[in-house]
Image (cartoon, rainbow, N blue to C red):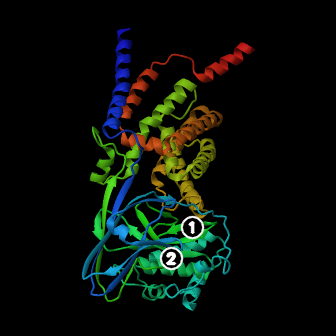
Amino acid sequence: MKENKSLRAIAIALIMLPILIILVRIHKNGGFTALGGDYKYIINYEFNFQSDALYKITTFLPVNNRRQEIHLHNSGHMSAGSVFLDGPNKLIQWRGSSDDANISCQFEFRGKPVAYLIRGSLTYEPRFSGDLEEYLSATQFIQSDDPRIRELATELSGQKTRLVEIIQAFYDFVYQIPSSSSSEFTDALMALDRREASCNGKSRLFVSLCRSMGIPARVVGGLILEETAKKTSHSWIEILIEDTWVPFDALNGYFASLPAHYLELYRGDHFLITRNKDLMFDYLYVIKKDRVYDYPVFAVLNIWQLMDDAGIAHDMFKMLLLLPFGAFLVAVFKNVIGFKTYGVFLPVLISLSLLETGLVPGLLLFTIIIAVVVLVNFPLTQWHIQYNAKISLMLIAVVITALLAIQILHTTGWLVASAPLFFPIIILTIISERMARKIEEEGTRNATELYVTTLLVTVLIYFVLSSEFIQHFVLTFPEIILTIAGINLLLGKWIGLRVMEYYRFLNVTSS
C-alpha cells in the first residue's frame, strides 16, 4: 500500500510540476498568444544619395500572400513616399530635390515554407495564346523565341509527354550550370552561351525554356533573409501548373518548393531599384532576425535557442521529443484499448518516418516491403535456410525493393525529391526483420493480423504527431515529457479491462 501511495505521489508530482512551470512561463512571457518556431525579420531599406537636381527613386514593397505576412512600419520616410500598385506589384517612389539625403523604410516579414507535389499523371499541353500571353511571350531579356533556346528546349523535352518530366529536364539543365558569384546582369542567351550565371541569368534561362514550349512562367524577385546587412537581391521563377503558380529556384536547388526565409518583393522581370542615372547613389538592406513565440523567460531548456546557437537541425529535436509522446500513445492503444502491435517503439518510428515520406507514399512503401518479406520467406523456409542467413537474405531483398520503390515513387511524383528517406528506410528494414521473425514463430496469418493492427495504430499516431501544434508545443515546452512520464507511471498500474475485452465479453454474455 505504501509503495502504491509513493508511486502515485511521484506520478502526480511529475504530472503537475511541468504543467505549473509551463503556466508560469506563459504568464511571464506576456500570456499565451501562439506556438511555433517562427522567425520574424525586420527589413530596413537604406538609400543614401547626392544630387544637385531633382531625384526620383522607385523600389518595390512586399505584399501579403499565402506564404508571407507583411507589416509595414509607417515611418516618416514611408509616409513621404508615394505608394502605388503596378499590376501584381506594390511600389514606393520618392521625388524631390536635395544635395545630400538619406531615405529609409522598414517592414516586418514572417514567412512559411511551401512545397508542391506535381501530379505525375499530368500531361504536357502547350499554351501559346489566350489570357496568359504575358507569361508566354519573349521579351528583351527572356529570349524564348530565339532558335537556340527553342532547339535546346526541344532537345531537353525529347519524347516526354508528362509535364513534370519536361520541367524536371529544364530544371536539371539550369541547375547544373555553374553559379557565378558576380552580380552582373545576365539575360537568357548570355547564361546559355557562357554556361555560367547568377540567379538572374538562371531564372531568365529557365523561364525562356518554359515559354518556348508553351508553359507559362515568370521571374520572381526578392531577398534571401538572414541577419546581416547586404546589397544582394535574389531571383527565382514560378511556373503555372493547374492554376497554381509553383516556385522553383535552380540556383539553390528548390524544386517546386521554397523555404520560409525567401521574401518575395515583385513578380516579373524587373529591377529592384530604379533611379536617376546621374544620381550618386548607394543602398543597403539591413536585416534583423527575431524568433516569435519561443517563451524564453524561465525556460530551463530553450530548444529553439539551442538550435540557433548550436546549429542543430530542427528535425533532429522534433524526432527526439516526439518519441516519448508517440510511445505513450502506443501504450494507451495497447494497455487501455487492447490493440496488439510490433512492440512499442516501432509503430512510433514508422509514424515518424511517415512524417518524412508523406502518409500515402510511406504506407505504400511499407506495404510493399512487408509483402516482399512474406514472399521471400516462403522459398527460404522450403529450402530450410537457417534463421540468421534467412534474415540477411530478406534484408537484401528489402533494400533492393526499397530502392526500386523509391525510384518509381519519385518518377511518378509521389515523393518529393528532397525528402530525407534514409531514416524511413532504416525503420522499414527493422520492421521487416520483426515481420520475418513473427512469420517464423507463429505463421503468416498471425503475422499478417499483427501487421494490420500495427498499421492502424501507426496511422492514428501519425495524425497526432503530424499536428504542427503538437510539434511546436513539445519543442517550446520540452518539460512536458515529465508529465508524460507521470501519466505512464499511472498507466503502468492499470488493472481494468481493455476496451477490446469489453467487446469480447459482451459477445460471450449475449450468447
Can residue 251 be seen?
Answer: no
Image marks 2 and 1: residues in contact by CB distance under 8 Å: no
Q: Which residue is mark 1?
A: 245
| Residue nearest the observer in this picture, 307 or 477 | 477
Structural crowding at the residue carrying mark 1, measured as other residues with C-alpha within 10 Å and reported as few (<14), some (14–19) or many (≥20): some
Label 1 is placed on what type of residue? Trp
Can residue 142 be seen?
Answer: yes
Label 2 is placed on what type of residue? Gly
Q: Earlier in the sequence, mark 2 or mark 1?
A: 1
**Residue 276 x/y as whole percent:** 36, 86
In the rendered image, the vertical position of residue 213 relative to residue 442, given as above or below: below
Work out how far the residue at label 2 is from the one at label 1, CA to CA, in angstroms.
Answer: 13 Å
Q: Horizontal placement of 486 versus 120: left or right?
A: left
**Residue 156 x/y as whole percent:** 57, 80
Quadrant holding the N terminus: top left
**Residue 351 x/y as whole percent:** 51, 43
Residue 111 placement: quadrant? bottom left
Q: Which residue is mark 2?
A: 268
| Residue nearest the observer in this picture, 253 or 58 | 58
Quadrant holding the C terminus: top right
In the rendered image, the vertical position of residue 156 relative to residue 46, given as above or below: below
Q: Give the numbered dot on residue 173.
A: none
